[in-house]
Image: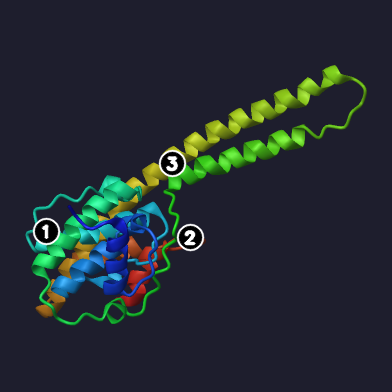
């Protein structure tokens, strides 16, 4: 039997000097990355967003974790698609495995978690909702508001006429549901391509670091970086890329 979720949350908070209240918060990926850093000391914490609030940020953190596992030849599969949904059972089971791995591999050396993440904020929300479900809840709220507005139609003495506003509300609600479904699909597509670009960015950065350490340069890699970080007028750089650009 592994530790309970209460014991694991207390252990994570003590090791990483954070203030999690639920094991579900580990689904952002940041805590898993830093636990591995406490063992090996070579995790690129500047690329880990400890206060991630959106699913695309969670995925980026898990990409870092996958690279850690790959570089240290850890053959444990990481169920990213389940963990980023921030469900209790999935994160409990994975954190129990992480704790056993830590117990077997941590050398007892001191670990300054705050210094390793350079004081980066860790205020992950206690209740985490992926992008798509929040869209549905937003549309439901709008639909409820529309129904209340329709119910306040002034009484004119012609009760049969009140069906027209109700039909209008129903049509608007149907349109909102359709638009919400379309938006959800666009958000999933955006996250899919963002994850691919993120993989390319990490690979380029890793190769650039290797070349810089050897005193070499690669014009092609620098051109790729320019394309990744280039913007158009009126376009705001996504926050993860901005953080990394400032760090490096």
With 159 as the anchor, is 93 left or right in this view?
left
Give the image location of residue 73, x and y in percent.
6, 59
Residue 33 appears in the rendering: yes
Q: CA distance from mark 2 to mark 1?
A: 35 Å
In the rendered view, how is the structure colored? rainbow
Residue toward you, 57 or 220: 57
Residue that badge 1 annotates: 70
For the C terminus, give its image quadrant.
bottom left
Whether 112 is drawn above or below 23: the answer is below
Looking at marks 2 and 1 on the same chain, the residue that comes earlier in the sequence is marked by 1
Total residue callouts: 3
Residue 218 appears in the rendering: no
Looking at marks 3 and 2 on the same chain, the residue that comes earlier in the sequence is marked by 3
Whether 201 is drawn above or below 108: the answer is above
Give the image location of residue 40, x and y in percent.
14, 72
Q: CA distance from mark 3 to mark 2?
A: 18 Å
Give the image location of residue 74, x and y in percent.
9, 58
Residue that badge 3 annotates: 186
Residue name at image x 63 percent, y 40 percent: 142
Whether 215 is drawn above or below 54: the answer is below
Q: Quadrant of residue 162?
A: top right
Residue name at image x 34 percent, y 52 percent: 194
Residue that badge 2 annotates: 235
Residue that protrudes farthest toward the top in the picture: 160
Whether 243 is drawn above or below 61: the answer is below
Give the image location of residue 82, x and y in percent.
29, 45
Q: What secondary structure is marked by label 3? A: helix
Numbered disc in front, either 3 or 1: 1
Residue toward you, 192 or 57: 57
């Amino acid at each position: 039997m592994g530790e309970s979720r209460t014991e694991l949350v207390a252990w994570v908070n003590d090791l990483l000097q954070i203030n999690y209240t639920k094991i579900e918060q580990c689904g952002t990926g940041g805590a898993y990355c830093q636990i591995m850093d406490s063992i090996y000391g070579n995790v690129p914490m500047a690329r880990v967003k400890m206060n991630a609030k959106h699913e695309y940020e969670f995925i980026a953190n898990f990409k870092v974790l996958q690279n850690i596992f790959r570089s240290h030849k850890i053959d444990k599969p990481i169920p990213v698609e389940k963990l980023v949904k921030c469900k209790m059972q999935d994160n409990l089971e994975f954190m129990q495995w992480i704790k056993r791995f830590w117990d077997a591999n941590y050398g007892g050396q001191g670990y300054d978690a705050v210094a390793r993440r350079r004081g980066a904020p860790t205020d992950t929300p206690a209740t985490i909702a992926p992008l798509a479900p929040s869209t549905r809840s937003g549309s439901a709220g709008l639909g409820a508001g529309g129904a209340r507005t329709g119910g306040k139609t002034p009484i004119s003495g012609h009760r049969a006429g009140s069906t027209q506003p109700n039909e209008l509300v129903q049509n608007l609600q149907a349109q909102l549901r359709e638009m919400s479904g379309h938006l959800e699909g666009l958000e999933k597509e955006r996250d899919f391509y963002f994850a691919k670009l993120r993989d390319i960015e990490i690979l380029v950065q890793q190769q650039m670091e290797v070349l810089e350490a050897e005193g070499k340069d690669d014009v092609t890699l620098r051109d790729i970086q320019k394309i990744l970080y280039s913007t158009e007028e009126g376009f705001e750089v996504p926050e993860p890329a901005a953080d990394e650009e400032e760090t490096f």
